[in-house]
Image (cartoon, grey):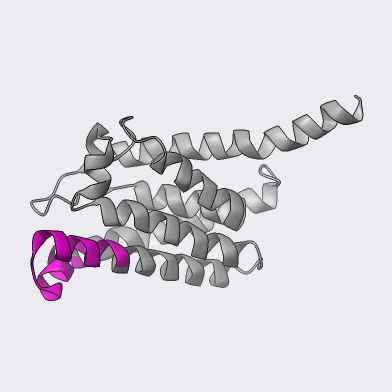
Amino acid sequence: MNTNTKTKATTAYPLVICGVFAAVMVVCSWIAIPLPSGVPINLAVLGVLLSAGCLGFKYGTLTQLVLLGCVGLPVFAGFNGGLHVIAGPTGGYIVGYILCAGIVGFIASRTKSFWALVGAMILGVLACYAFGTLWYVHLMDITFAVGLAQCVIPFLPFDAIKIALAALLVQRLRQTNLIKL
């Protein structure tokens, strides 16, 4: 293999892995339970945590940006897509996924500790909650307390399970060296 081919393969691999995790994220987003608030319970947070935990800051965040860039394609919950979804009440959570991935990826790429990974995932989800809930409260013209009651409290048990599952899966994938960037 000549140097040019090796460089192309080395450059292509991370992008392929980002694409794989973007596909995982889409499937996780599609698995959704609608709620009256309009913010569905879905597995998107699990996808964010997995991509950021496995890929680190740069590629974990890139994976979320790729999805945001798929405006118009049905990559969000309920097979929705388009600027109207991002600009709508749940758009803050979608943008919050980028913050979550950045936080989780930054910390995950600097530690091998399971508990540090769990802590990073908690911080990332909290950042997503904060950004998304503020966005939701603003657009829906409701109080912050109502926003918490509609958009955070019902999700806490599910997201705790997603954090535990994602941390376990990331640790296992790290041990097997299946994903190496």
108 sits left or right of 94 in the view: right
Can you see residue 148? Answer: yes
Q: Residue at x 65, y 52 (%)?
A: 174
Residue 124's quadrant in the figure? Answer: bottom left
40 sits left or right of 94 in the view: left
71 sits left or right of 48 in the view: left
Can you see residue 172? Answer: no
| Nearer the observer, 169 or 64 | 64
Residue 164's quadrant in the figure? Answer: bottom left
| Position in image of residue 11 (x %, y %) | 72, 37
**26 in relation to 162, above or below:** above
Marks counted in the figure total 0
**126 in relation to 105, above or below:** below
| Position in image of residue 66 (x %, y %) | 47, 40
Residue 146's quadrant in the figure? Answer: bottom left
**86 in relation to 163, above or below:** above
Q: Residue at x 46, y 46 (%)?
A: 65
| Position in image of residue 131 (x %, y %) | 31, 65
Q: Residue at x 16, y 65 (%)?
A: 138
Range drawn in magenta: 131-153
| Nearer the observer, 166 or 11 | 11
| Position in image of residue 60 (x %, y %) | 54, 51
* Quadrant of the rendering where the N terminus is positioned: top right
Q: Residue at x 62, y 48 (%)?
A: 173
| Nearer the observer, 152 or 172 | 152
Give yes or no for residue 173 being in the magenta stretch.
no
In terms of secondary structure, what is the magenta stretch mainly? Answer: helix
